Amino acid sequence: MKTRFSSALLLIPFSLLANESDSDLLKSLTNDMTIISKTAKIHRENIDYLPYIMTVFDGEELSHAGASSLKEALALVAGVNIASDNLSLFNPVFRGSNPVAYGQSKLIVDGIEVNDLFFDGYTAYLTMPIDMIKRIEVVRGPGNYSNGHSGYAGSIMVTTYKGEASEEGGRWFTSIGNYGTKKAGASYASSHDNFSFAADFYTVHDNLSLSYEKDGLSNNLLGTVNAPLSRSGGAPSATDATMLSASISKGAFFADGRLSSYRHGSGGGINYALASDDDHYNIDQWQVRTGAHYTAADFTGTLQAVMVQDSFTSNSLLGPAGLILPSLTPPTVAVTYPNGFYGISEAIIRTYQVNNTIEGTIYGGDATFGVGGSWSSVVSEKTLSTDRDSGIGMTDYSATRPFFNPDGFIRKLNAYVNYERPLSSSWIGYASLTVEKRNTMNAQIAPRIAAIYTIDSDNSIKISVSHAHRNPSWQEMFTLNNKARWGNPELLPETVTAYESQFIHRFDIEHTLSLNLFQLDNSNQIYLQYNTPLARYEYINGLKSTIRGIESEWRKRYDTTTFYAAYTHVLAEDGNGITLANTPSDTLRGFISHDLYENWYGSVSGRWQGSTPRASADLRDDMKAIGIIDATIGYKLPHLHSEIQFSVKNLFNERELYPSPNQTYNGDYPAIGRTFMATLRGTF
């Protein structure tokens, strides 16, 4: 059955090959196709002529639809669901592809990949206010859409106002809401002759606390003797995020940098033990990049060097007062922790990168070649906890019981080539190949072929076949001395083979309907398995899944009204034919935005997902279907170059939850309820 389905995806357009003519008209039409394709690629506006299954939103369009952050914007995109965990680390999941693992997708902000090295996620960037964002492009499925950045399940390209400023000036905004929410930010750009400068800044703060059901101690995660200590109730879930970036260019030379600081309450706790008081973790990152553009004969190139530092810090209660654990120093005795078991962990990892990209025309097509390398290693590691032999006071275990391997490193070499060429007046072909060598693993080869067939001015078809991989993250490889998650440096990359086809119908330039069929064959997926002899959860390879589905998107823009709707249906099974856990079969989302009268505008947005199945060993009922409605109204102040907006998220205060793993928390992880936000924004 799987083979027949895959073949059907590829054969859809080939019956349309007839009646191609070889004439001056054909050459003229072929040239037109080349121009259209190049324009779409450069300006990224007409996505119908790009060889990816993708959705593009303008930041202003999203803000008027009520989205206040990158996370809320992604929740409106077809095929993307937001997952979370015990620490409220958020993870956009594309079409149900391994929702328990980070790194399934890549986030590229102004051309720079920002996934942190520790988790290979980008939780910190999901708080980015929508008022900083000019455009969001979401690619579903594997692909090398942004040179050198290849996503496994998908890619997200964010272009900020700073990153694509077309004229001198700036923007600003400030927001206030319930739960003590405060946001503010600004961006500015200036250009004179061949020198340009741009910078932006934002800060986000809230005082959120979420209520959890009985924690993991109730399921004997820290032994039966500690089960009576299980707790429930409110836990710290507040957010403090700040980001600053700047860029300069002078002629062919350019340099830029970004500093991100993210602090969040520990919520469900590091070890599934409910956090309390001021428990928190930090995910911080800074980046510096410099380089130059150059020409070589008929080719243009870019050579650049990048330095990135990622850090993860946790200050959290690991077990409640009265906890009993065995001592570390023989003879082993039971140690009681009268004030609880507290831990402080810190990891700082630095990465150096060099890469070179060159582009040009070869045999009538556009070619891009790239080669690069990176080296990541530990700058510092710190592990402190309550003394394991006395149960009181703090002891430094950095040398004897580090929370991850201080000698861990990642060395990576990669090369890629992309090529696209018009094949006729109706066909454009695309091919890419990426080769990557990481540490002692075998080289990973990721090919992709795609084509676009233009039936007529109103209809076109895209097809693609691709193979990609996801490397294990630092956490999955090098975590130590943590029974809730133990790393495995021998992990293999996850792999996926994807088959996709999409039919696009254009009613007019601002009115489109698309239908997408896809199949994803995943293997070697990484997950946590309980090791009974060692009494700990360990990362291993082993999960397989086949995900088949259909997606449809409809978009219509009038002068005063914008409609967007997206529906996704997936049939997801693991390697044993069992329905894949934590993946809803049906999702629906969309919005209507309308200019009411004079300077008023309003919008209604919504998202719905069907019931979410549990893992086969999980005896809890499936998660219920849920629908969320948001509403927004705004008023423009043209004489002040500004506007004011008021939004209500989760209008009917539905109880939204994220699935918790079996035998951890009795209930699922909570999400925020109804929120209110007022925003004032403007330009200067």
Image: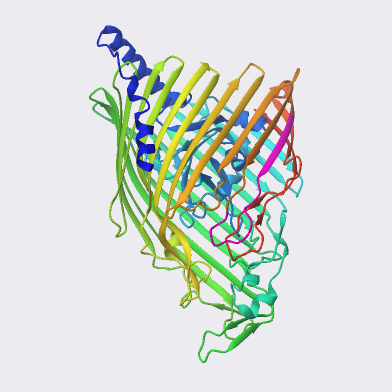
* Most distant residue in the top direction: 24
**Residue 234 inside the magenta-drawn segment:** no
Could you tell me if residue 130 is visible in this image? Answer: yes
The reply, left or right, for residue 532 in relation to residue 369 is right
Regarding residue 151, the answer to whether it shows in the image is no
- Residue depicted at 72% across the width and 41% down the height: 650
Q: Residue furthest front?
A: 1
Q: Position of residue 313 (x, y in %)?
A: 56, 62
Q: Is residue 623 magenta?
A: yes
Which residue reaches farthest bottom? 331
Q: Nearer the viewer, residue 202 or 610?
A: 610
629 to 11, vertically: above or below? below
* 278 displayed left or right of 466: right
In-front residue for pair 333/370: 333
Foreground residue, 4 or 506? 4
- Residue at horizontal 29 percent and vertical 14 percent from the top: 20
Identified at 30% across, 58% down, the residue is: 441
Image coordinates of residue 315 in percent, x first then y, are 61, 66
Drawn side of residue 466 relative to residue 276, left or right: left
Magenta span: predominant SS is loop
Q: Residue 555 appears in which quarter of the rendering? A: top right
Quadrant including the N terminus: top left
The location of residue 109, given as percent across then percent down, is: 49, 40
Residue 460, placed above or below residue 650: above
Q: Position of residue 674 (x, y in %)?
A: 75, 45
Q: Which quarter of the rendering shows the C terminus? A: top right
Q: Which residues are magenta?
A: 614-633
Q: Nearer the viewer, residue 246 or 569?
A: 569
